[in-house]
Image (cartoon, helix red, strand yellow):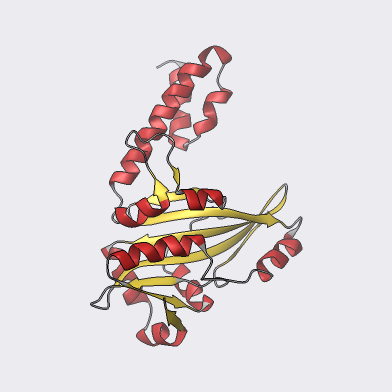
Amino acid sequence: MNDSSTRREHLSRLGLLAGAALLPACQGTGAGDWLADRAAANTLEAYAKVQDKAMVDAMYVVPPDGRNARPAQPLLASHYVLERLLPTTLALRRPMGNGGDMRGAREIVDGYVPDVDRDVVLQLYLQVAKRRGNVVKVYKPRMGGRIASLFQPPMVMGPQRVEWYAVDNPLIEWSSQGRVVSVLTHAFQAATSLGVLVSRYSSVYFGPSTGRHLENGIRNSEFADLELRTL
């Protein structure tokens, strides 16, 4: 295998779609096409494994050829980007500002006030749940911390980063039989880069295993005590 092929395969494994720009100019166009094709194939492969396509389709648009997949227009207009697409998870990220330093970042998070009636992610989530005849309940932010303890965080963890999990209102979709169908939860992260960037991560967890995991991990008394209202 020549050096050029090895480099392309390495970039593909890391998911660096912009890697073509790093290749020699004489190879740029061909390598760019190869990487785009590979990215499209990876997108289609990930989408094929999704366990709740109705929910994902409402928030993330995957064309038949897998190219130019993107958040749904209302989310795109609000500057959301895809963070993660897994069989039981759709995670989106939205920039919230640059705090300059960690103190400024904390001020951004402290100044955030949840508004479930105007949250664009929530509205799309609610539409899907109601179309299939389910009930959505909104919970106090402390439930967000409990849910976060049960699932893999959507953000990249590391030094000079701080996370908040109990700032926003999570939602749970319940079936008519009283079973958990899906969960929408939010988290914030401050990450040191050029200043300290604050991002909001909105994650939808779904699928039978997700429902069982949440039901077994949170006591019935917690569901009752932390419930705010039914939407």
- Toward the viewer: 26 or 133? 133
Name the one closer to the observer, 159 or 200.
200
Residue at image coords 75%, 62%:
104
Question: Percent from the top left, x then y, of residue 212?
Answer: 29, 70
In screen coordinates, is 176 left or right of 23? Answer: left
Please name the residue shown 51% across and 65% down the image.
186
Question: Going 38% across and 54% down the picture, which residue do you hit?
Answer: 58
Residue 96 is left or right of residue 130, and the answer is right
Outermost residue on the top side: it is 26
Percent x, y of residue 36: 43, 28
| Residue 92 at x, y percent in the picture | 49, 53
Instruction: Count every numbered label the image shows and give the total.
Output: 0
Q: Is residue 3 visible?
A: no
| Viewport quadrant of the C terminus | bottom left
Q: Is residue 139 above or below residue 107?
A: below
Identified at 33% across, 68% down, the residue is: 130
- Res 118 → quadrant: bottom right
Residue farthest toward the left in the current orientation of the protein: 177
**Residue in front for this viewpoint, 110 or 135:** 135
Q: Is residue 173 above or below residue 94?
A: below
Note whether residue 226 is visible.
Answer: yes
The x, y position of residue 164, in whole percent, is 59, 67
**Which quarter shows the N terminus?**
top left
